[in-house]
Image (tube, rainbow, N blue to C red):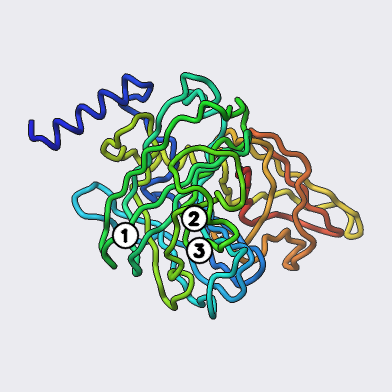
Amino acid sequence: LSMSKAAELAALIANVNKGSSLGNKNFIINGAAQVQQRDDLSIVSGTTNEGYGPDRFLFLVSNTGELDGTLNTVTDAPDNTGLVKSIKWTTTTPESTSVAATDLVSIRQKIEAQNLQVLEYGTSDARHTTLSFWVKASIAGTYGFTMYSPDPNRTFSAGYTISSTGTWEYKTITIPPDTSGAINNDNGEGLRLIWQLGVGSTYTGGSDSDSWRAFANNEWNTQHTQNNIVLTDNATFQITGVQLEIGEKATEFEIEPYAVTLYKAQRYYQYQDIYFDKGTSSSSTDALAYYYNTPFTVFMRQAPTLSASAINSNSGNATTRHGTTVVDGWVLSTAYNNSATIRGNHTAIWNYIYGRAKWDAEL
């Protein structure tokens, strides 16, 4: 074996011995940016704005004044890795002067608590984890990474350096075990991973040590210094190959089939294009209520909320039809984690319902 392969094998064996596995070792969902069920995300300036583009990756801006931008999936990835896509933020309108004290801008992924019990946080047997990812940015410098554990309200922060602009670079961050902060065994949020792009002074200045500590504003990220991504027109930041695994060494990114990643993502968000032929009433003046019962593709994390749009689209309006005239809207009648019932109300003759039902059970 070459030295690099021997080292990789040794790391893999060590990780397996500490509780990882040869397959399904990655706690991150959609780390290769394979799945994007929604439209590209557009962030519009305002006090707080957040949303999803690529599945499971949330973009958050808080307290910014002018910042606009987009988060989407692009066909750009590091060579010779098996990766073909990445998650890309592009600043379309930067902050006009500087990052204010209370500003926060970041890319995030939240991990379900019951998927993290193997880490045994809050006990003397708590395990190390290692985060690895590829990153490319138009601005070099030191960027911050934060891991937040909501149940015990504790944080870990670290920094990493992007050395060259417009070049894919591989980064690893080893995260020590948290022996003091237990993660509840439930379907709530267990860990939040945060790639910082803009951090105001309110959230910096704490002790500069890579360790878990009780949450405090100034401990949110102690090492992030490069805010120019949000201060520069057309600045870009990309990540892919994101993996969080048990152990103190990173191993090769686990490529999984698209269908597997989609299945995992649909626990938190899925959509259905619905055309439902219901018939007509016996009277042109009847007030009618009709119901569409639908099972979900995957059992969702919890009973989801419903939003709707035009069929085959994530924008526009879902409609019920009365003859050829659009009438009324959709109402979520009942929802469970495995199925739901949509109700549509209108008067007079009607014959079908159509549109895209979007089901959200995100953390």
| Kind of residue indicated by mark 3 | Gly
Q: Are the residues tagged 3 and 1 within 8 Å (C-beta)?
A: no
Q: Residue at position x 49%, y 67% from top? A: 70
Mark 1 to mark 2 CA distance (whole Å): 16 Å
Closer-to-camera residue (318/220): 220
Q: What residue did someone put label 2 on?
A: 107
| Kind of residue indicated by mark 2 | Ile
Determine the image quadrant of residue 112: top right
Q: What residue did someone put label 1 on?
A: 162
Q: Residue at position x 40%, y 30% from top? A: 128
Determine the image quadrant of residue 74: bottom left
Q: What residue did someone put label 3 on?
A: 198
Closer-to-camera residue (154/54): 154
| Secondary structure type for disc 1 | strand
| Kind of residue indicated by mark 1 | Ile
Closer-to-camera residue (184/265): 184
Q: Is residue 133 visible?
A: yes
Mark 3 to mark 1 CA distance (whole Å): 15 Å
